[in-house]
Amino acid sequence: MTVLANGISDLPLIAQSVGNYIGGSWENGETESFISRNPANGQVLAELPKSSRATAQRAIAAATAAQRDWARMSAWERAAICAKLGDAVEANKDSLARLLSMEQGKPLAEAQFEVGIAAHGFHMAGEQVRYMTGEILTGATPGRQILSVRVPRGVYAVITPWNYPVNIPTEYLAPGIATGNTVVWVPAPSTALVAVALMRVLADAGLPDGVINLVLGEGATIGDEIVSNPGTHAIGFTGSTRTGRSIAERGAGKPMVLELGGNGPFIVRRDADLEKAALSAAIGAFSNSGQICAATGRVLADAAVADELAERIAVIAKSHNPGDPLHQGSTMGPLNNAGVAQKVREHVDEAIAAGAKCLTGGQALPELGSDLFYAPTVLTNVTPQMRIAREETFGPVVPVIALDGDDELMKVAADTEYGLSMTVFSRDIERAMAMAGELKAGFININEMTPFWETHMPFGGSSGTKSGLGRIGGKYAIEAMTEIKSISIPVPLYGKA
Ligand code: NAD
């Protein structure tokens, strides 16, 4: 398979390797292929292998072959390798960010931030694993003790989406390998080229053969293979709720982390600082063109302040400058693919047809270079029953729902199948804390945007919701990607032996 140039000739990083990476070798022998395009202009970036199940099975075999020796290294040795990988990602930040911008569509500054976070992720996993601890339990039986130690799960199946295609994989790859697992990684097809580039950086930085294996192609084929194959022992998946359900079925019985969709309510009480609330809502809804699982999905505002808040958000929306993400001055890029663009159009058009008022945006901007550009949009007169309020839109859209008082705000916030992130804005911190205590979500931000997050905090959906299960981030990923083994040992008693 070959890179078809078009603007990436300045990326020697990936020029020699645009295939699968299995057992330490780059491969491109698949009979079928798919194309990666720049969403800002439709240009072809690369032709990549559409791998078969047989290729995924070979990757599992390579990960299996590497796992014993990798797990036998000391945690401190693996930590040192993770630090080298983090350094390498940091050293290649500019070229990785450029490619990320070009293939995913986010502005260069956002891409640089993402790559920087990924570099930190490898360092953090190394630091965390160094200080991983077990326990020694007292024995009920005289002369015995129980050692309880954390051990790797084995071969991990890791499947990742296109919205943060450098950092989300790192959230599994780094703690996964730091703890002694080996990995087969299937990235999303529409950002497969930047996955290749990241893999190339890691491989060149001294990652031992077979520790991470990259397989490109369709999730329904190779993703399904690595999830269901008995050769993998555990699953790390970030993506849609629909795919998460399939993975839960196909991988039933394996330990898994599922990081799924969200539709974060952004609750604004009547006493809130509206200037700060408007800015937080806008950042939470327009960053990465709204393609964030923890995005501000819907603004629930007290009716006393809803209009003013919506006007303020609209002013920020109008100040955005959508355009080619590589151009200086572009503050928002295109949506990543046709599927997400269609969903955004449908949600907005249906809402307007049902009576929502569009303060700004509400349309695609094909004149910017492709049908995937969508104007930052603010809607008022939205009702809780509209699809835009009930489902994850995943686009640069702020639907504002006006409600009467805290009880209504809480009722509508809770009336959702999702439970990932939520925000409460209020000057009354005690009241906001009480509301946060009552809401069902994996994380809640008071007087901050819904996607506010730090790399070491536990991240994941609330139990019983469509937002997934398990936690990643910092020590929580180390815990999730290991299991506890108990070894009972004799403790010789002096004078009794
Ligand atoms: P998606 O579910 O369509 O695809 C995710 C990955 O799964 C891709 O690599 C895809 O190839 C693969 N896949 C598809 N079908 C599969 C199957 N049958 N078996 C195995 N793998 C399969 O999701 P997407 O559109 O790429 O990502 C957007 C979604 O991800 C949104 O819903 C968003 O909220 C969610 N997301 C969640 C988080 C989180 O941390 N909770 C973070 C980012 C994105």
Image (tube, rainbow, N blue to C red):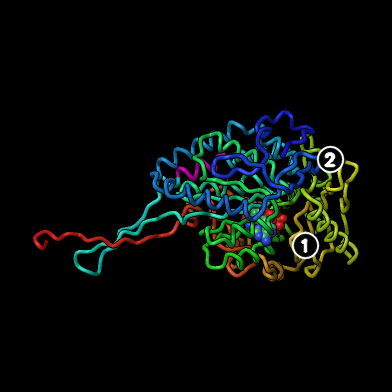
Mark in the foreground, 2 or 1: 2
Whether residue 51 sits left or right of residue 176 in the image: it is right
The question of residue 124 being in magenta is answered with yes
Name the image quarter holding residue 196: top right
**Label 2 element class:** loop
- The quadrant of the image that shows the N terminus is top right
Q: Amino acid at mark 1?
A: Ala
Residue 222 seen anywhere in this rendered image of the structure? yes
270 is higher (above) or lower (below) than 473: below
- Residue range in magenta is 119-127
Whether residue 81 sits left or right of residue 320 in the image: it is left
Classify mark 1 as within 8 Å of ligand 1 or not, answering yes or no: no
**Label 1 element class:** loop
Q: Camera-side residue: 34 or 359?
A: 34
Quarter, ligand 1 = bottom right
x, y percentage for residue 435? 61, 65
Q: Identify the residue position indicated by label 1 in the image.
A: 304
x, y percentage for residue 86? 53, 37
x, y percentage for residue 421? 64, 59
Proximity of marks 2 and 1: CB atoms separated by less than 8 Å: no
Q: CA distance from mark 2 to mark 1?
A: 43 Å
